[in-house]
Image (cartoon, rainbow, N blue to C red):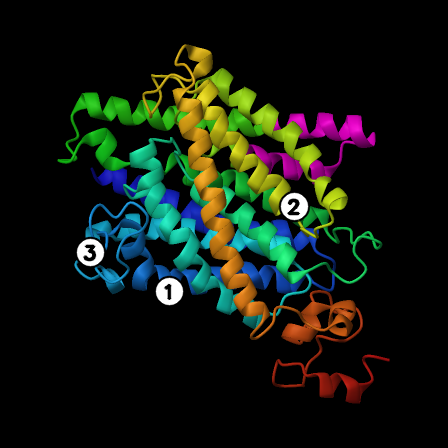
């Protein structure tokens, strides 16, 4: 079994890389040059805050015992508080799940880029993971309502991660409001090289996300025996998730570019990067459930539909800065629901979907699982979002937003083109007073 734990350490490190630096690069490149540091900071801060919270009560609320009865909605956050009674040999799996929680929260930041105070984001994070992520993680992965009672399949987090983050992004975008001069000003990405680099790193890291989600007990049994039959099953399942993740992502990238070409007469680098992420999102819940043809179909559908869906924000009038809704919410719904069409009995869930003679039952289960995730995340996020809005507030001032949130919030700029990051000699810090005195803002 030493090989399994080594495998999980590598998978955990890959998922850790997905938040910092991969997502930070991906979102940072899509930002304007005056906002890139703030955008990257939101990913780094998410890792710090959510990681501490996860060790204190997140693991307990996700995988501990219920308050009473069967605990189908969430577990008791105090039973295993601070990993009490959790033995060190389980710390690897704790770390693996910690990285899932961190990237889920960080994904939301792309919907409210350029205009949110870092202090408000820091306050939001522990409340959101406590009220939204940990309960949904329990419902999906911890023996709760979605996975056990309904029986919806979700191999690696289409509901708890992507639908959850996508709904939260939509709710916060509506509560926080539009950026100054949106959509009149184009607000184009300032560095697509960073975005492409981030997309590539996300693709690599996603193998930890999906392939690492194989559950030890499901394959080796409670005794974790390493006999040849169980090892063969382990290899088969990891091979399926590995290849499904790859080909679905390829199909999604091509599907996005095709739709983009039809709609806008161009196949863009940003479209390729976005298509990659859309495919990864959609195959996340389905990677263990479908065969290779099903994976290609899910990827191609997700790429094409998400390429169309990102334009809805202009028609509906909500400012989702980096298409969290169009990619993660839409892609997560597609991947989750289409399991009901494409799943095969030979897959991890052991269920045939509609296209393989299984009838409508699985499709209903998948739709119900997605619906519960949408409702739970929407209500939880709205409560937290409005509470922050009417207390400490979400927004920096309009003037600070126009000048650039990097300097307003951090006293720095990513590119020292006008001396703003020069700072005070010998201290490594920058203040508005110093810059004004030196005439750097002239």
- Identify the magenta region: 252-280
Give the dominant element type of the magenta stretch: helix, strand or loop.
Answer: helix
Instruction: Name the mark nearer the viewer: 1 or 2.
Output: 2
Instruction: Name the mark nearer the viewer: 3 or 2.
Output: 2
On whether residue 274 falls in the magenta region, the answer is yes
Q: Nearer the viewer, residue 223 or 107?
A: 107
Q: Earlier in the sequence, mark 3 or mark 2?
A: 3
Residue 263 appears at what percent x and percent y? 79, 29
Q: Is residue 368 left or right of residue 58?
A: right
The 10 Å Cα crowd at callout 1, few under 14, some 14 to 19, many 20 or more, is some
Q: CA distance from mark 3 to mark 2?
A: 39 Å
Q: Residue furthest top?
A: 357
Q: Earlier in the sequence, mark 1 or mark 3?
A: 1
Q: Residue at x 81, y 32 (%)?
A: 264
Mark 3 sits on what residue?
Answer: 86
Q: Secondary structure at mark 1?
A: helix
Mark 2 sits on what residue?
Answer: 323
On whether residue 259 falls in the magenta region, the answer is yes
């Amino acid at each position: 079994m030493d090989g399994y734990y080594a495998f999980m350490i590598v998978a955990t490190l890959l998922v850790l890389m997905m938040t910092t630096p991969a997502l930070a690069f991906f979102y940072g490149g899509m930002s304007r040059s005056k906002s890139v540091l703030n955008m990257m900071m939101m990913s780094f801060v998410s890792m710090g805050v959510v990681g501490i919270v996860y060790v204190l009560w997140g693991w307990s609320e996700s995988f501990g015992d219920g308050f009473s009865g069967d605990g189908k909605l969430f577990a008791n956050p105090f039973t295993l508080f601070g990993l009490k009674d959790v033995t060190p040999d389980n710390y690897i799996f704790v770390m693996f799940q910690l990285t899932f929680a961190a990237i889920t929260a960080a994904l939301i930041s792309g919907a409210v880029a350029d205009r949110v105070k870092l202090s408000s984001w820091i306050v939001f994070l522990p409340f959101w993971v406590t009220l939204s992520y940990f309960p949904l993680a329990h419902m999906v992965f911890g023996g709760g309502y979605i996975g056990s009672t309904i029986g919806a399949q979700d191999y690696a987090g289409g509901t708890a991660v992507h639908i959850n983050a996508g709904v939260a992004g939509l709710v916060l975008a509506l509560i926080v409001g539009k950026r100054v001069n949106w959509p009149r000003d184009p607000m184009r990405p300032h560095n697509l090289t960073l975005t492409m680099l981030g997309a590539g790193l996300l693709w690599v890291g996603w193998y930890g996300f999906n392939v690492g989600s194989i559950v030890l007990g499901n394959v080796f049994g409670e005794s974790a025996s390493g006999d040849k039959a169980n090892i063969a099953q382990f290899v088969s399942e990891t091979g399926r998730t590995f290849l499904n993740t790859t080909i679905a992502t390829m199909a999604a990238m091509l599907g996005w570019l095709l739709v983009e070409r039809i709609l806008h007469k161009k196949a863009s680098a940003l479209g390729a990067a976005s298509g990659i992420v859309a495919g990864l999102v959609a195959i996340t819940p389905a990677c263990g459930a479908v065969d290779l043809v099903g994976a290609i179909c899910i990827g191609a559908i997700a790429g094409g539909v998400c390429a169309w869906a990102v334009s809805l924000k202009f028609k509906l009038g909500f400012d989702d800065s980096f298409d969290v809704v169009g990619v993660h919410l839409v892609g997560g719904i597609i991947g989750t629901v289409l399991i009901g069409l494409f799943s095969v009995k030979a897959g991890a869930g052991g269920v045939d979907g509609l296209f393989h003679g299984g009838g409508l039952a699985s499709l209903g289960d998948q739709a119900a699982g997605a619906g519960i995730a949408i409702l739970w995340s929407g209500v939880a996020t709205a409560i937290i979002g409005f509470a922050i809005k009417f207390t400490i507030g979400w927004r920096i001032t309009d003037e600070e937003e126009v000048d650039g949130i990097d300097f307003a919030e951090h006293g720095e700029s990513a590119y020292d083109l006008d001396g703003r990051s020069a700072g005070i000699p010998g201290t490594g810090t920058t203040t508005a007073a110093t810059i004004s005195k030196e005439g750097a803002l002239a």
